[in-house]
Amino acid sequence: MHMPEYTAKIKEISARLLKEKKVEMVIGFRKGTVPMMNEPCFVKMPEDVKELVWDSNCGINLANYLTDRKEKIGIIAKGCDSRNIVTHIIENKIKREQLFIIGVPCKGMIDKNKITSMFENEINEISEHEEKIIVKGEGFEKTLNKNNVLQKNCKICIHRNPVIYDELAADLLDEQKDIDRYEDVRKIEAMAIEDKWNYFDEILSECIRCYACRNACPLCYCPTCFVDESRPQWVGKSTNPVDTRTFHFLRAYHCAGRCTDCGACERACPMGIKVRTFTKKLEKDCLELYGWEAGLSLDERPPLDTYRPDDPEDFIK
Amino acid sequence: MRLINIDKKSWTGGLENLYGNYRLFGPVKNNKHHVFKELSKGELPDLNYLNTLLSPKSIVFSQSETMFEYSLDESKEQHHILKEINKDYSPQALIGIRPCDAASFQLVKRNFDTPEYKDPYWLRAYESTTFVGLACSNPCSTCFCTSTGCGPFHEDGLDLLLVDEGENFIAKILTPGGENFIKSAGWETETDPVAAEKIIKNMKIKAEKKIASFVSTDQLKNRSAIDLYAAPFWEEIAFACINCGTCTYACPTCWCFDIQDEVSKNLGIRMRNWDSCMFPLFTLHGTGYNPRNTKMQRVRQRFMHKLKYYVDKYDDGIQCVGCGRCIRLCPVNIDIRRVCDMMNKYEG
Amino acid sequence: MEDWEPRIVCFLCNWCSYGAADLAGVSRMQYPANVRAIRIPCAGRMSPKFILAAFMKGADGVWVSGCHPGDCHYLEGNYYARRKFALFKNLIEYMGIEPGRLHFSWISSAESTKFTSVVKKVTLAVKELGPRKQGIKRGVYG
Amino acid sequence: MQNPYLPYPVCIDEIITETEDKNLKTFKLVFLNPDDEEKFSYMPGQFAELSVAGKGEIPIGIASSPTEKGYLKFTVNKVGLVTTCLHSMKAGDIIGVRGPLGRHLWDTLKGKKIVIIGGGFAFTTLRSSIAYMLDPLNRMNFKDINVIYGARSPGMLLYRDELAEWETRDDINMHITVDSTDDPDWKYNVGFVPTITEQKAPPWDSDTYALICGPPIMIKFTQPVLDKLGYAHDHIIMSLEMRMKCGIGICGRCNIGKKYVCKDGPVFTLAELDNMPKEY
């Protein structure tokens, strides 16, 4: 099934849900005003479902828009969104009964930074056709293979199908097999200690502390983030590199066992910082130490909310 | 006003001459994008760029800036008393700044240089800066500078405008500061002003024709602030917003800041950091009450400030130069052009 | 650098390790004076931000000590803590802080001998690494 | 260039605990450099930034009156980082004061009848106003002065000695009230400020101005009472609170519409507020 059919199906389901008053709103995407950007939006009237779209520019995680909402909601969910919806339900940020989940088996989102950096001139238009991405700008037109320009997290995604849904907008896909999810983490782990330090100094050097990474993340719903606490103030407000580093590592730690590697943080970063480098380490450790992958089941407690008497402790004296 | 011809062959030499007299800043491409940074000796600005990712406002208004320092050591004289610190306000030049960004400094100056109070940090940095503009022949699709009283060849706020003619620059000297800069560089090939102006004019028309996006602002002044504030569209506009500070930090005309103390051991500083009206903390009272507690209120504040409060306060257009950065960088595609049109059209 | 002595911040559970420190003191047992103890109500109260804050403010090492598994005053605080510590220890190393700067132990209130021996071990480990070169916050800006 | 962010150094001369919950203390401050007192020329209703080195600044209304020379007084409620630190300080400690900040409307008030309505710890700048008007050199510049001041309980009233002294004077009408009390010796009113206002406030004429300062809930319920009594909105003056940093209209956070509370306020007439978004 191709993107236009996805969109048509999403519209059809959404219109039906709104007409039958099964939900008060549908949360999805509408076409963006610039290439490779779609805007999260809500639709309340059946006649407005024409706004909804689905394509390879729906990288924002819509679970972010569910936090503490009270109404009945239809929500479009790709694999990672659905896992964050599961996490939201487990963490009591939304109730399952409130949701009608329109599952979208996801073929991956494209990496706008990567595509932008491939061209000297500005990109004016992007369209997609099956597995091809056609990029147009002043004086050039180029066809790219979608697989080569996927967001990095999509490239290594092993849960493209929604894990929880009420209706599907397309047929389920075969999941990717034999994926090495942690090649980049292992590379850093293998570095000398000083090289690690310098590596993170380097990738964080451009951080402007805008908190787009935090705020794009469906996990970051604390009423007061540790970085905003003033008594005591754990992290300074300036661009001091020690503060910036502390912010990123603590934030990543706060997502331990909850992160689904949806890539929203990295996609949101205006400076193109590889923010997933932080969260992925914890994701890897949760898998290796506790056999845990976030957001796959409503019935299991996340790893930091439970324990086993025989958990590894060889590091403790 | 003079017009000078700068052969690109003499560009590097001129910059070398300038190096001792100015701290030079210019656009440089790191591995990802163009940023304004201080040029080291021999480093050339890369003038083949659309626009820098972030605005150059930080060169005059640093994201984090120390204001005072003090000692908390009671055995020291003058302990707990804030002291001004010495800062480098020697001449600096921003080379290759786009006209929209240059105009933003004029606009922001209204805030930092008022009849009652002068912000010494901003003003001293501003006054030490020579703005060497680079006319924009290839505006981005998100640029709407011509709608904001600005434009790709706009001269306000510049000391000098460079127009790239391929083999050479035409340099239009606009102020005594620009004159000093040219002298210091040693560029002195006069050019026929009439012919040069004609070339500039033609290029300007061509560049302005390339501007593809526009906003209407003509009705904003006539609209009632109270009506706009109560308009029904804010909920819809704000829905996607994630309350990050990207738009405000990228914006050349956003000036809000926070003041903070930091202490290490017995030495303390008072500093200021950029702040953002998108953050809930921006307006949170000590009591816990927050007059802008919801995302909708904060998004509304940002647009109302730029497109209505500022218009009403200064009666000189909107607080926006149309650089399009907030549109390009917003993680969720909230587009000021769309909001501006909605506000301009809204009749209450 | 010869006379350099590391400063180590240690967080001790009120119900066990803090008591062990007390007992070591009352029993006049000798141990290096490099540790600065902070009493916490339970290892489960330990937050990674305490550890990062200590490092930011210049601690050369951090050591957290709680009750042996099964002995938690609140039944299971240390079990939860153990998972947090495991992940955090790995993360600290990943970010470029030597693993020898962060230590964990289980010490009951009767184990004053273990307490002194762990103090010695921790101090030695941190001493061997020398003073921290990076990540201590001090600053004047622009 | 004068640096408007640089505080004047002052020494804490005296600290008075005002209320029974000990959350309100009055700080009497003396300038370290006598010249600075000259520069700090203020009027009631203005505020200043109190600066605690290592903690930061907080905007606080000036509780002393310009007629009281040699010191400044600030009554500070313990709420956040800076105020908590202030509360732990002692006489002799050095802090900073930056100001005076904000505007005042005393040119309008000269020669008028004044009705002061205050609640809780917002009475500080009203205290300044009363002390100013009662100064022998100023009293003839004002007609009748009525004061309605309420607190939760007798122990929560600020400046109790002064209130008692004002009660005994005949050039000011005091209407002190508490929400409730079990003190059998309480000789003043019992009831909320809006109720007492309705009973005691003089009827409005074009010579009468009301100055209101209090918690939002008090203001919310007092405003209809004043409407009922016929007070014109441009004769009602209120003081607003906002989170502030610079205090001089530059840092951008305390706006309501196009006005900055720090610089264009903190006092506004109700008529002005009627034309501003209700975002406070």
Image: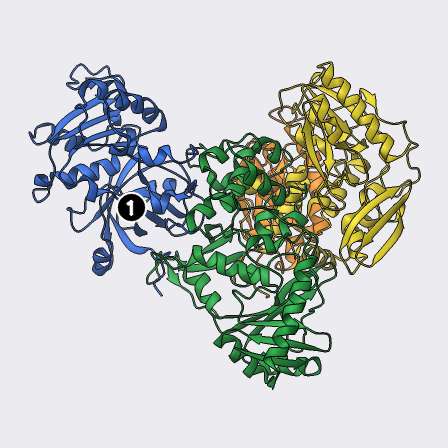
Chain colours: A yellow, B green, C orange, D blue
Give residue B180's position: percent from left, percent from top. 51, 80
Observer able to see residue C140: no
Specify whether residue B245 is in view.
yes
Q: Viewed as shown, does residue A35 lie left or right of B211? A: right
Indicate whether C14 appears above or below C132: above
- Determine whether B35 is above or below A169 in the image: below
Task: Estimate the x, y position of residue A266 in percent, counting from the top left.
Answer: 72, 45
Question: Which percent across, then down, holds residue D45?
Answer: 26, 41
Q: Residue B41: image x %, image y %?
A: 64, 77
Q: Quadrant of residue C90?
A: top right
Location of mark 1 (residue)? D103
**Residue at image point 30% right, 25% down:** D223
**Could you tell me which quadrant the C terminus of chain A lies in?**
top right
Of residues A135 and C142, the one nearer the viewer is A135
* Residue at figure coordinates x 67%, y 54% from the top left: A204
Viewed as shown, does residue B226 lie left or right of D90? Answer: right
- Quick one: D140 or A285, which is closer to the camera? D140
Q: Amino acid at mark 1?
A: Arg
Give the chain of mark 1.
Answer: D
The image shows residue B185, relative to residue D265, as above or below, that is below
Within-10-Å neighbours for mark 1: few <14, some 14–19, many 20+: many
**Residue B334 in the figure: left or right of residue D141:** right
Q: Residue at x 82, y 50 (%)?
A: A184
- Horizontal arrangement in the rendering, residue D189 relative to residue B6 (left or right): left
Please, what secondary structure does the residue beneath circle 1 have? Answer: loop
Task: For the N terminus of chain A, give its image quadrant.
Answer: top right
